[in-house]
Amino acid sequence: MALDNNLVSIAGTALVAANGLPVDVKGGAIDVFYENDAGTITGNPDSLSPEVDGDYRLRTGSDLMLDNEIISYTAQNTGKHLYNNTTMTMAWAIGGLSSNASGITTTTTGVLFTTRAFFPVYGSSSLYCESAISFDASPTTNTQIDFGLFLPNAANPFNPTDGVSFRLTSAGMQGIVNFNTSETSTGIFPISSTDATPWTYTLNKKYQFIIVITQRGAEFWIDSVLYGVIPVPQGLGQICASASLPYSFRHAIAGGAAGAVLKCNLAYYSVSLGGPAIITTPSTNGARTMGSYQGLSGGTMGSINLIGTITTGNVANPTPAVPTTTTAALGSGLGGRFWETCTLAVNTDAIVMSYQVPAGAVATPGRRLVLRGIYLSSHVQTVIAGGPWVDEWFLAFGHTSVSLATTEAATTKAPRRVMLPFTQPVTLNQAVSTVVNQITDFVDFGDAPIFVNPGEFIQLCKRRIGTVGTSGVIVHNITPVYGWE
């Protein structure tokens, strides 16, 4: 092995720039390190070596998306997010969520946006929190903005009580670690390792702010440059007291009137877990980040499988109706309780459950529905007159209008149909409060789930074979198992 001007030649086969890194001359190997950050701000390059186990396997990891929200809609998603305010307000818009929407400078005011979900900090994994944020004015006195993973105080000014966050004050931007109200700061971020002038932002430019939390400490990155590191405080076992934290975004004016109006705009946030190879399907991950059995961001909030009228906390029974081929006569929802008047003509296809996947638009991001399975159970609510008959069930999906008669054309799409093993025999004059028997109550689509695109319908339908009923009511309880992509 020969050394020449910081170049290493191993067995005469290659020249490698060692750059001052350790060289194992006897073994003919070079210790490998990967540079995460050049040290532009901190002054010290951030380099780590990969890890190999005793059987020569290189340790690798994958990211698991825990939450991701692009704020391109005009109303709060009350299913995912909490919103608290005192005088100051936030505004949801196509361009993001703006704090201090009315542009006030009044003291003792504040506003808070936080997720209902909490995200875990554990093991040797890394918890990542990313925010795309801009500011419309320079930092100003008596104004503080915090964003990241932290528990907020429930009352104005909604200050962090535990967690890790970026913080903007009149002094500039800094990173904060909060252990049960005891704070540690990176100090105000400088322009570079050789210039202590506080880092400044370009007005209205969206910056990528990333927090990385590990068992060793917390890192603070802006546009892929490491600006600060806070190790776990001495004597403590972890970076913050909580084992899990929500995403939070807070703007407050305290200690006197603000020196000037300042607004902050959040375009999106994401939270992910890096390290453990947790296996998950795209639809499961979509359900985790976008929710299931409730409205999507930008759409109608609340349950999407509630059939009936809410009265003083209870859901009133639906009004029975005769299902039809062309309308959602029994009500619209992705599952729920459907009351059927049993006078459907024989050999007629009819819609029982009907749901239209929200159409994609700027303010309502398009999501595909992924149906993984469906439950069905039925019972007699009002005694049957007439019969007997058999109801054969099928799934209709993909059509662009509610009617099963929708045709296939350049701008329209006919329903696709999948027969289901929900075959239900109804006996002559079947009695009230009896179950309508069927072979199975669940269909699992397994490795062949059904995908329904934005704007398209998915419906659970039936066809009656036998003798028509003259009166009576059957209740159908339907529960789809699904996710979003």
Image (cartoon, grey):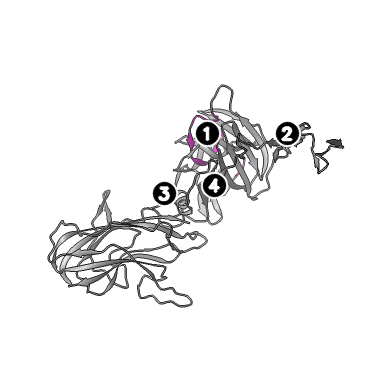
- Marks 1/3: CA distance? 29 Å
Which element type, helix, strand or loop, lies under badge 1?
Answer: loop
Contact (Cβ within 8 Å) of mark 2 with mark 4:
no
Residue at 56% across, 21% down: 235
Q: Is residue 33 magenta?
A: no
Give residue 42's quadrant in the image. top right
Choose the circle earlier in sequence order: 4 or 3: 3
Q: Amino acid at mark 1?
A: Gly
Camera sees residue 99: no
Query: Which residue is the site of mark 1?
Result: 123
Magenta stretch bounds: 238-261
- Marks 2/3: CA distance? 44 Å
Which element type, helix, strand or loop, lies under badge 2?
Answer: loop
Query: Which residue is the site of mark 4?
Result: 270
Mark sitting on residue 44: 2
Choose the circle earlier in sequence order: 1 or 4: 1
Horizontal side, residue 474 vs residue 216: left or right: left
Mark sitting on residue 7: none
Residue situated in front as seen by the camera: 73 or 391: 391
Mark sitting on residue 79: 3
Residue that extends furthest to the front in the rendered view of this protein: 11
Magenta-drawn stretch, dominant element (helix, strand or loop) = loop
Q: Amino acid at mark 3?
A: Gly
- Marks 1/4: CA distance? 20 Å
